[in-house]
Amino acid sequence: MSEAGWELPIGATPIAGGVRFRVWAPAAARVDVIVYGPDAERIYPLVAEERGYHSGVAEGVGVGARYRYRLDGEAAYPDPASRFQPDGVHGPSEVVDPSAFAWTDDAWRGRSLEEMVIYELHVGTFTPEGTFAAAIHRLDEIAELGVTAIEIMPIANFAGSRNWGYDGVNLYAPATAYGHPDHFRRLVDAAHQRGLAVLLDVVYNHLGPEGNYLPAITGGRFFTSRHHTPWGDAIDYDGPESGPIREFVRENALYWAHEYHVDGLRLDATHAIIDDSPVHILREIAERLHALERPRIVIAEDERNDRRLLLPAAEGGLGLDAVWADDLHHQLRRHTAGDRDGYYASYGGTGAEIVTTLRKGWFFEGQQSDHHGEARGTPAAGISPERFVHCIQNHDQVGNRPFGDRLSEDVRLPVFRALSALLLASPYTPLIWMGQEWAATTPFLYFTDHPEELGRLVTEGRREEFRHFPAFADPDRREEIPDPQAEESFQRSKLRWEEREEPEHAGVLRLYRELLALRRSEPALRGGADRDRFSVAELGEGALALRRGDGAGGAFLLAVCLGGEIRIDLHEEEATRPPEAARWCYLLSTEEARFGGEGAWGTLDSEGVLHIMAPGAVLLRACRAEP
């Protein structure tokens, strides 16, 4: 049931005796609903309302009926607020009863941001079957891992049988390729039964190129040439007729909360959502979702390091809860894998820069960015750590690489294990990319399934993206980049769960489980820490220490070595000293044999001198000092 009696104000809604239809078609003088039957079509005229809406009740029509909207007696189009497109983006829409599903999550109260360890997944490649139903069968393993939330890449219906999801065109219809809407409800319900929150990635900055009928239905009024995005004209959030457009997007955000019980949204590329209105659409979405009986979490993906996203409206902000902060990923990848093309050119990847980023949450706070050619970022001061979502890989940072290679394929496993420990021991909100927990070897390639001509342009454009990279200056080399349109690119991207049984992968999985168990059970290692309860220090080039405390004497020190060996007296600096009347005691090393390492990690002597002999990380716990 929806909270507070909410009901979707557009689309097709079953009612007693029929279905109520409502659509925004401001350029049409007349709109009819065509309902398709086994033998004949039935036509139901709608009544024009103010502001370009058309609505009416089709008596005798029921759940499961297929329909389109016909404008001025001519072309007919799928419903832009369709709940299901059983025959794909070009087919008729289907009437769905959102109240028919029997939810079992009445006792679910969600997860706080401070509790969140996020697991990002793509439905189509998460399992061999690539469906909502199949994903349910892996939830027990995800819950046992120790994460508390799954973040599902966009499921808005897209053209073809495979897509990352960012080419969605039916924002209200779960992707036909993944299953029926009730299959997605069942996935959310099953996640809640296992204590997992569900975050959904949504795209409000553009729509896909194939099957997007919104310009036709709205008479070209959904987009505006006043603003531009990397995908072309922007969605018109601030024009004189933007009210229904804002409603379309705002209600979509509420729709996923009400009709699918999702616990929050991750808003794609918010830097490309342009709105000069007095109240930004992002603020409006956040306020509506926060006002629900069970408030939802709103996370931005934004490259600007803009604190305004997170500030409350009273301080001139937009009031979102958290933001993807990729600076740490970029610094670590530059340091360990040597990346320097594209946006990596703005990062030094030095030990000092990594430490600075860990202290603050992001690195750029107004400095000049070589890649952007201008100053970038705002100060992170005053923003609590859990509001920064950190990762060592995500779908973008893997999939936007020419060959979709994961970090664990580009650095030695000891380095990967050390970076994993750093991610999971930090006070920031960690995000794990599916398969990362066992150092999966499967790539995540860019894949599409567009019609031939559009597909050819996508393939050419994908390869052209890397033209300025020295490694791909040769056109013949660019031809080696996998074709997004090839079925093989999709199939190769599917996780191979059987890898987890192989020794080196099983060890990494064991490490992730143990670190997440510590994060869950130890107050000093949980997310949401006050900034005065953690510190970071450089131990030399390629080595650092992260100290966490709980304010009551409990403390942990993670020493990370990403290069050669290090030897350091932990009593020399404030950031590495144990609490008063305590000493550091060994807890674990990422290079223990049980985690896939060689076992001999180094030493911690009675004088507090730590010696790490090779890349890896050592976690120490404060214990009572011996008399």
Image (tube, rainbow, N blue to C red):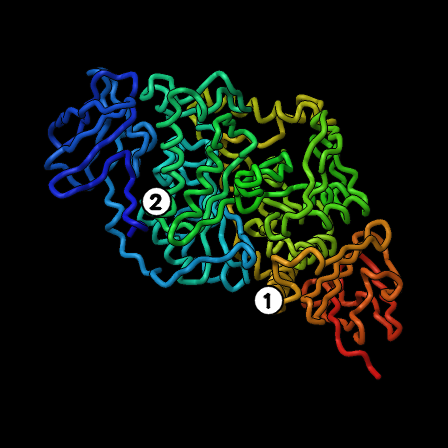
* Residue 64 quadrant: top left
* Residue 180 quadrant: top left
Three-letter amino acid code of the residue under disc 2? Gly
Dividing the image into 4 quarters, which one contains the C terminus?
bottom right
Disc number placed over residue 223 in the picture, else none: none
Question: Residue extending furthest bottom?
Answer: 627
For the question of whether residue 9 can be seen, the reply is yes
Q: Which residue is mark 1?
A: 517
Task: Report the Cα–Cα distance between label 1 and label 2.
Answer: 34 Å
**Residue 346 versus residue 570 in the image, above or below:** above
- The residue positioned 41% from the left and 25% from the top of the image is 210
Three-letter amino acid code of the residue under disc 1? Ala
Q: Position of residue 187 (x, y in %)?
A: 38, 53
Q: Position of residue 107 (x, y in %)?
A: 36, 63
- The residue positioned 21% from the left and 29% from the top of the image is 55
Q: Which residue is mark 2?
A: 179
